Image (tube, helix red, strand yellow):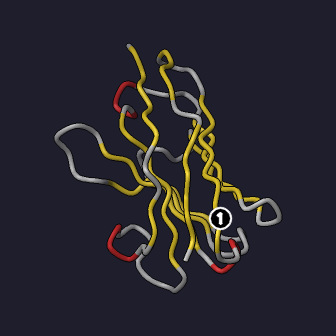
């Protein structure tokens, strides 16, 4: 199994940037495809971004396309989410998630392991 720990959240003004990190430990990191999800108060957890095992395939939700970038460093067991041009509606707890096998990348239930989350707050 793999353990995931997110960091990098915080308070930022509209239009600002943050980079979230997810440190993985345990099983070989490249054995897992990775995703970022977020959950705002009173709302369901929603898909943000996906990256394949080697990093050669990425998918972003339409709501963050052109503003966010997902990347990974398999040599150092790290996953990243670069967030630019942040908006108040991006405010949420952000989670990284891992899965070993193919599935619908946007469905949270297809991921096997989750971090504890990191809070991102964007002020208007």
How many marks the image carries: the answer is: 1
Q: Quadrant of residue 7?
A: top right
User: Residue 90: horizontal and vertical position, in percent?
Assistant: 40, 34
Please name whichever residue, 103 or 24, is drawn nearer the observer in this view of the structure: 24
Q: Residue at x 62, y 72 (%)?
A: 52
Q: Is residue 18 above or below residue 50?
A: above
User: Residue 11: horizontal and vertical position, in percent?
Assistant: 48, 20
Question: How crowded is the residue under tag 1: few (<14 C-alpha within 10 Å), some, or many (20+)?
Answer: some
- Residue at the left extreme, as displayed: 42
Circle 1 sits on which residue?
25
Q: Quadrant of the C terminus?
A: top left
- Residue at the front extreme, as displayed: 26
With 72 as the anchor, is 41 left or right in this view?
A: left
Q: Residue at x 35, y 67 (%)?
A: 108
Q: Residue at x 68, y 71 (%)?
A: 29
Callout 1: SS = strand
- Residue at the bottom extreme, as displayed: 101
Q: Quadrant of the N terminus?
A: bottom right
Q: Residue at x 29, y 53 (%)?
A: 45
Q: Is residue 5 above or below residue 93?
A: below
User: Residue 119: horizontal and vertical position, in percent?
Assistant: 42, 34
With 105 as the anchor, is 83 left or right in this view?
A: right
Q: Is residue 86 above or below residue 58?
A: above
User: Residue 70: horizontal and vertical position, in percent?
Assistant: 62, 53
Q: Quadrant of residue 104?
A: bottom left
């Amino acid at each position: 199994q793999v353990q995931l720990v997110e960091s990098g959240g915080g308070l930022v003004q509209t239009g600002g940037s943050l980079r979230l990190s997810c440190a993985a430990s345990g099983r070989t990191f490249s054995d897992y495809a990775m995703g970022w999800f977020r959950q705002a108060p009173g709302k369901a957890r929603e898909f943000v971004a996906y990256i394949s095992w080697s990093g050669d395939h990425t998918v972003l939700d339409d709501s963050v396309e052109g503003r966010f970038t997902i990347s990974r460093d398999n040599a150092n067991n790290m996953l990243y989410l670069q967030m630019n041009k942040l908006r108040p509606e991006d405010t949420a707890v952000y989670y990284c998630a891992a899965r070993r096998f193919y599935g619908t990348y946007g469905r949270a239930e297809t991921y096997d392991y989750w971090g504890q989350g990191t809070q991102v707050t964007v002020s208007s």
